Image (tube, rainbow, N blue to C red):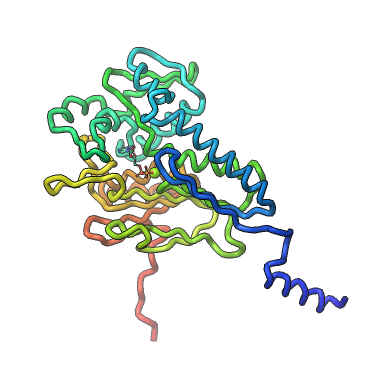
Amino acid sequence: MKIQTLKCVAYLAALLGLAGPAHAEWVRRVTDGIMGTRITVELWSEDQQKADGAIDALLEEMRHIDDSMSTYKPSSEVSQVNAKAADGPMRISKELFDLLVTAKEYSVITDGAFDITYASVGYLYDFRQHVHPDEKQIDKALPAVNFRHVLLNPKNQTVQFSQKGVRIDLGGIAKGYSVDRGIDVLKARGFTRAYVSAGGDSRIIGDRFGKPWMVGIRDPRKGEGEVITRIPLVDAAISTSGDYERFFEEDGVRYHHIIDPHTGHSASKVRSATIIGPYATRTDGLSKTAFVLGPEKAMEIYNRIDDIDAIIVKLDGTVIYSKGIEPAPRHAPSK
Ligand code: ADP
Ligand code: MG
């Protein structure tokens, strides 16, 4: 066959979807009920069985993280820490220890806006049952909120709370972390094109054959399918926090699941914040900040961090962008 003809056959095969190994395709699975949220996995695979095995292993990893870190499970390692760490140093798993170290780093980076000890007050809220603490309860619990109360000793791999009443909750970082661990599982099995999300935290490896993945950012005041914009992404993580997740209203006050560690009240200074960066642990750990510090102060912090970008929907519905993704200003056409 002439080269020209060969090229022609290859082109036709590509058009018919026959290029590459047989049966290569996008495999997608949606699973509910891990970490109280929806897990979506999509990957490019040349072998359906291999894809199924990898997704099973990924979900297993996420279930393990849920079992170890959920505060809803009394047997979890985190629940054990909450029950005992005020009594003295407690040896914990390497995985939990490392994530507690990371969580503390985010408290420092965000001027204390991200703080896993928010739970010392946060446990008094139940957004499903529309329960919130009164001022007296908040005043009493608030002194226990401070990430500095969590004492970590790397030598012995122990955690200790410096006072009674301290509680931690990793709900603001564990989903991002589980997405990163899930991506690790896929990478270890040789997958190079995949999307993994747990609720509002997602990460992507590779592209869609020359095209980016398009990830929508939900409009905070509209239905689930309504987006304010779509972001093209390749090899990146993205997390969105919104005041429309887990909330109720009472006497004109919106109670929702992000808590200001300084006041013990819902942090309501923006409607939503989306962070784009290299890892989902990182983007998850940073997406709460805008709610606590407000759009300007938070954007200052986001702009200071080299490897992340941010999109914030302010209370009036306007959208602001970090320097790296600011839409180009419209110039008048030059004459
Ligand atoms: P999702 O749970 O859908 O990923 P977010 O990433 O916005 O949503 O995380 C919200 C969760 O973060 C809350 O449900 C709570 O567990 C936790 N959280 C609330 N306030 C804080 C805070 N100030 N610092 C750290 N974590 C917080
Ligand atoms: Mg999150």
In the picture, the quarter occupied by the N terminus is bottom right
Image coordinates for residue 131, horizontal then vertical, percent: 20, 36
Looking at the rendering, the quadrant in which ligand 1 lies is top left
Above/below status of 104 relative to 222: above
Image coordinates for residue 53, horizontal then vertical, percent: 63, 43
| Image-based side of 16 in relation to 34, left or right | right
Question: Based on the displayed image, in which of its 4 quarters is residue 101 positioned?
Answer: top left
Image coordinates for residue 177, horizontal then vertical, percent: 47, 39
Q: Residue at x 49, y 18 (%)?
A: 155
Q: Residue at x 22, y 25 (%)?
A: 143
In the picture, the quarter occupied by the C terminus is bottom left
- The residue at the far top in this view is 87
| Image-based side of 1 in relation to 80, left or right | right
Query: In this view of the protein, which residue sits in the foreground, 64 or 328?
Result: 64
Image coordinates for residue 294, horizontal then vertical, percent: 25, 48
| Image-based side of 252 in relation to 29, left or right | left
Q: Residue at x 37, y 18 (%)?
A: 160
Query: In the rendered picture of this protein, how many numbered marks are placed on residues?
Result: 0
For residue 296, say whether it is visible.
no
Query: In this view of the protein, which residue sits in the foreground, 6 or 158?
Result: 6
Above/below status of 208 relative to 63: below
